Every structure is written in C-alpha cells, then in structure tokens.
Amino acid sequence: MLEVGSCPRAAAGEDRMETETSGTTEPRRLHILEPHEVAALYARPSFTPDEQQHYFSLTEAEQAACADLRSLASQVGFILQLGYFKARQLFFAFTFAEVADDVAAILGRHFPTAAEVAWEPLSEPTLRPLIQAADLSATRVDAPLLEAVRFITATLGAGTSLGQCKPEAFPSRFLPVRQKRYLYSQEPGDRKRLIPGRYEFLAYQRVRNGVEAGDVVCHRSVQFRSFEDDLLSDEQWQANAGLLTASGRIVLDRPIREQLAEQEAELEALIQEVNARIADGSNTHITVRQQGGRTRWTLPYPRSSEPMNHPIFDAIPQVDLSRVLAFADEGCQMLDAFSHLLGRYSEAGISPAVLRALVVAWGMNMGLGRMGSISDISTHILARASENYLSPETLKAANDRVSNAIAALPITAVYNLGGQRHSSSDGQKFETAIPTFNARSSWKYFGLNTGVVANTLLVGNVPVNAQIIGAHDHESYYVLDLLLNNTTTLQPAIHSTDTHGTNQVNFALLHVFGFQFAPRYRNFPEKVEKGLYGFQHPRAYADLLLRPIRKLKTELIIDEWENLRRIFASLALKTTAQSIIVRKLNAYARRNKTCQALQEYDHIFLSRYLLRYIDSPPLRQFVQRALNRGENYHQLRRAVAHANFGKLRYRTAEEQVLWSECNRLLTNCIIYYNSAILSRILEAKLAAGDTVGAAQLAHVSPVAWQHINFYGRYEFTTGASPIDIDALVATAVQRPIPGGGESTEAV
C-alpha cells in the first residue's frame, strides 16, 4: 500500500530565527468570492470515472518521464499531479488517502499488478525460522498479537501449511479494522475467504512495530529485550543504591522536593529576568517588532573565527606523515600501548616502523596490500602484525596516550571557552564500497549506496572518543555513551551538539552526570515557542514575550523519583550500553509513567538553557565555536581517509572499527604535532612580552594539514632525522598572527 505525507510548502523566511506571538486583534480582510466560489476555482478537482480516464492518460513523453522515477509512490504521485495540473493548471498538497479513488484508478490502468507487488517482500525462508526461534513476549499476557504469532509458529512447527487451516482457526483479535478488507478475497455467493499469506505478513509487520515500540520484547536479545531487563534488579538496586552517594553525584542523593524547590526559584527568576531585559532594551541582540497585531523577534548567532588550515602553518616546512607519527610516539610513547593479543608472545615485541605502517594503512583507508606496494615493509609482514597487534582496545589505549599528551601542552588551555572545557559530538557519514551488516541506506548522503556514521566526541579540538553507528541511528542516543566512556584526562564541563544530538531526555541525563548540555537548534524560536515550560500556570506569564506553554508536572517527578534514580544508577554502573537505555527511554515516553516523569524532569533544564541562550551572547558564541571545531575535524578526518575515493573498503563491522580508531590515531597525532608547534609559539610570544600575539593564538586551530604530506612512497624503516620543533617554528614566531574575533549575523 502507498503511504505518502502531504507535500510540504516552503514558508517564507524559514531560515530566519524568528517567531511570532498572536495578538488580540484579528486582521481585516476583503472578501470578494464566496467559499464555494473559491473552491470551484482553486480546490483539487474531483474526477468522474470518465474524467479519470481522460486526465490520467499519458503521452509517450509523459510515460518516459514517469518510468524514470524509482518508486511506485513517486510514479503515482507524478500521474496525480499531472492530471490535476491538466484540469486546473495548479499543483496541490494531498495524501494518497485523500485521493484514494484517483489512486485506485491509476493503479488499475497503469500498474495492474501493484496490489500483488505490495505483498512480495514476505520472505518465508528467512522470516519463518526467525519468528519461530525468537522468544517473544509482551507487556500484556493476553496480547492478541502474540496469540496470532503462537498460532503461526505452532502450525508451521507441526509441518502444516497455513493454507490448510480452517479460516475460523485463525486468531483475529489483532486484525485492524481498516486493513481487514485487504486480507480477504471475494468468493462466489458473496462470501469472503481469509488469505493466509497476507495474514502471516501482517502478523510479522505488527511484530516488528511492536518490538520497536517496546510492546513486544525478546528476552534473548540485547537491543530488544524488556526495558526492565536493562536496569538493575531489585536486589542489585538495594545493594548498589549507596554507590550513588559515594560517586559524588549529590543530585541523586538530595531529596527531590528540595531540588525542585531550588530549580523552581531559579527558573521562575530567569523567566522574569530574561523577559525584563528584553522589555527594557538591555538585551541589545534580540530584535522585537510589531506587525499586524503580532509580535515577531529575531536573534543573531555568531560565526566562529577558528578556520582550519590557518595561514600560520604555511611557514612550517613540509614533513611526511610517518615522521609525524614518530614525533608523536617520541612525545607520548603511544606505540607502547600495542601488545600482542596473546600475552605469551609479548616479550618478542614488534618494530615501531611496522606499527606506524599499520596505522597509516588502516587509517588512510588504503589497505595492507596497497601499503605493501608503496612502502618499504612487505604486505605479509603487515598482515601478520595486523592480526596480532591491532584491536579496538590497543588502539583506544594509544589514542588516550596522545590525547593526554595534548592535554598537557600549554596551548590546550587556551582553547577553553569561558574558562571551561567545552566538548561537542557529531556524526560524519562515510560511504561503504562493500556492503556490510551495519551499513545502511541514506538517499541524502549515499544516493543508492550504503554507508556508516563515524560519531566523534571532541574536547576542544581533541578527538577523545569515537564509535561507528548506522546511518539510520539517531545520534542523540549515543551522546551520553561517548561522554561516560571518555577515559582521557580531558573531561568537559559543557557539551554541545546540533539538533540531531537532542532528544527528550538528554538534558536531564547530562545534568545528573555532571555535564551541562548546550545544543544548537536548527529552528531556535520554534523550540522556544514549543519547549519553554514553567512552574506556574501559563496565565501567570500572560504579559511576557517569552511565555511557557504549560505548567510542569512536579508531582509526577516526585512520585517516580525512586524509579528515576534506579535508571540513573543503571546508566552509571553500565548494566548495558547507555545508548540502548536512552533509545528505549525516548521510544517509551508516551506509554510509561516513569519515562514521562523523566521527560518532565528534562523540561526543567531545557527551559533554563533556552532562556540563557537568548540572554547570553557568550554562550551562543561558545556553542557555535564548539560545533565549528567538530566540522573542522571532519574535514581533517576525510582528508586523511582519502584513499579509494573516500569509500570504506572494509568487509566487516569489526574492520570498520579498526579503521575508525586508526584514523582517529592519525588525526590525533597531527593535532598533537600542530599543538606542539603552537605551544612553542605561545611560549615564545609570552617570553617576548607579546600578550596580544599570545591572545590571538586562541583563534588558531590546530586542525591543519597543508604542511603534512599524505602522498607518495612511505619509508618507515629508513632512519629519518627527528623533527626539530625549535627549528620549524623559528620563522613562524616572527610572523604576525592574523587577528580573530566573533562576527554575528541575524538568522
């Protein structure tokens, strides 16, 4: 069956950060035509069968254009719009359900087999063994869907075909009324007969929907088991409740009523203060104007001034990537983190040159065979070393050593924003040349091909953690995962994401674990209009420009606080991957009282942040700079993984993880090398009393690679001279540093 949403209409100025508040006066309009006259001229036509035959006929050119469209839905939509345009010379927004008669006429004339095609995806050899092996259960013991599933599995298990069963034997309580007409065929004598294949297909489809919604669970699955199975058991909760206090997270130990009283005082004061500063003109960045009884406001946001490939590195002589790795190893002994996967062979050791060649071969996406042909180390040596020494654990340990070494450099503190370490996370899409289990389609990024997402956590400019996720996964589920599994010394206080990193619970979860969440919303005024809450009834804010939409349900939070603490404890003790728990918390929010309470708790910190973002230009600048640093890093990462046209050539998800960590190690080493150069320049500027030049270094990003050679033949075993940092920066110190600053632009 076809399901298409209504056609979106472009709103004027949708890229502007503005909102409007309804006034009390209604605009006056001049009425020339009556409603029925307007409908006769501009409404979507309603065709008779003869008109359908006429307007939905296609010329040869129109048939060719229709055939170029990929999906049946697109082809039917094309014929509908074409027919309506022939009749009215207008295009219309509609859903297929609204024009069902016209759709049926088109299908019957141009796509007579479409009804049968809709049922073809049922793959019996794959789905039937899977549904028989899955240990399914439901939140309701007498769930009608499970009754149908048990009937199907019992029948198939007995070696009986569903077509041999009597129609009255099929459980029918789960059948939706609207879809029953598709499940029966018309028999002589005006009788209807159930179609077993379609019944089975519908049952499998409903199982899938139930699993995703949490109504159907599989206890032997990590991702789709019951939410309660992901949390601490009652015995574990009683035994580990004291660990919350010992962890230093006071928010979990203090009485919730006391916390809510403090948060109410802070939020209510903030609502009044922010609105007062707008009313008296103290907030000079927001622009408010009246238009036709409506109030509109706009807010500027800053453009960051930390471009990648800063000109200061143009004065640095070119070095090849292998020498950069040797320099990083000399500074932090990162290669010592690589040990033989079988401990009994650890004393034999491995040449650092081979390890450097391995990291370059994997991280640059060229493969061991290609590296063996363009370097002085043979392929079979690289292959054996890769099997014995490369693992996600050893690579993560090596990355942590480099990140910690960068943290110790003087320049790193210069990149703090507002005196605090500010992190960001974002996903970067990479197309896969070879289909893998975790690769997914994304028309926007990969066209007809598939790919994965490299999700990276940056603290300042340093990639401290990363993971590979599917292109269909929501990045917000992995924000807490990245932060809590950051094992470096670079621990952030504030974390930013774009809109893709936000969901219904992340503000609350990050607050509990000691992070301030500071995302950038694509349509910020709309978020304020729909996401601002208060502790009072909305009528208490009637005279304010920024008005909460409703009162927070504090009693719900209080009633469910003990269950919320159990969720927080499960996340802290990592009973399962944090991303799985966060995913379920978002999926179950409308049905689960505890999840609803967590969402209400989240509204408090979301509302505080929205008001602070409006009132604080520095906060807006810091969020923008943190996210721009992530974009700069993505450019570096893609430049490093340039081989094979940037398409990942690895066959398994495990190999993709190795590529990700090797690629991160290469970029980490480049950032370490650049940070060491900038640290020497900083020390020289301060020693010379050039405080202005030293301050300008805060706008020089260490994400640069124009002075590093990624190409040509690699010589790992040849004894190249070590990099002399003092000699490299001698010329750069004498050059003036281009000034930086923040510019703003209304959006």
Image (tube, rainbow, N blue to C red):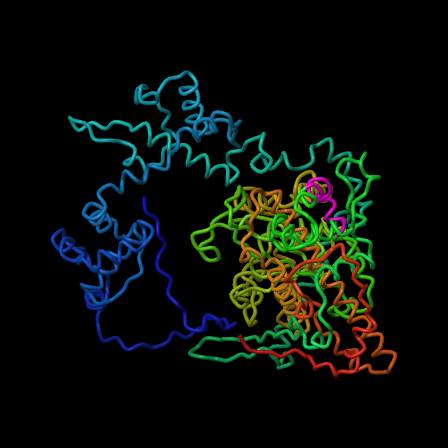
From what the image shows, is residue 571 above or below residue 552? above
Could you say which is closer to the camera, residue 554 or residue 365? 365
From what the image shows, is residue 284 above or below residue 627? below
Where is residue 7? Give x, y as percent.
35, 60
Assess whether residue 94 is covered by the magenta stretch.
no
State how many labels appear.
Answer: 0
The magenta-colored residue range is 384-398
Residue drawn at 41 percent across, 16 percent down: 158
Query: Image quadrant of residue 544?
Result: bottom right
Where is residue 173? Give x, y as percent.
38, 29
Query: Image quadrant of residue 79?
Result: bottom left
- Main secondary structure of the magenta stretch: helix
Could you say which is closer to the camera, residue 122 or residue 336? 336
Residue drawn at 78 percent across, 66 percent down: 412
Question: Is residue 33 shown left or right of residue 625?
Answer: left
Residue 113 seen anywhere in this rendered image of the structure: yes
In the picture as drawn, the residue positioned furthest to the top comes out as 158
Where is residue 467? Give x, y as percent.
64, 50
Assess whether residue 392 is covered by the magenta stretch.
yes
Question: Is residue 22 shown left or right of residue 256?
Answer: left
In the picture as drawn, the residue positioned furthest to the right comes out as 687
Could you say which is closer to the camera, residue 538 or residue 134? 134
Task: Name the quadrant of the N terminus.
Answer: top left
Where is residue 585? Give x, y as percent.
59, 45
Residue 556 seen anywhere in this rendered image of the structure: no
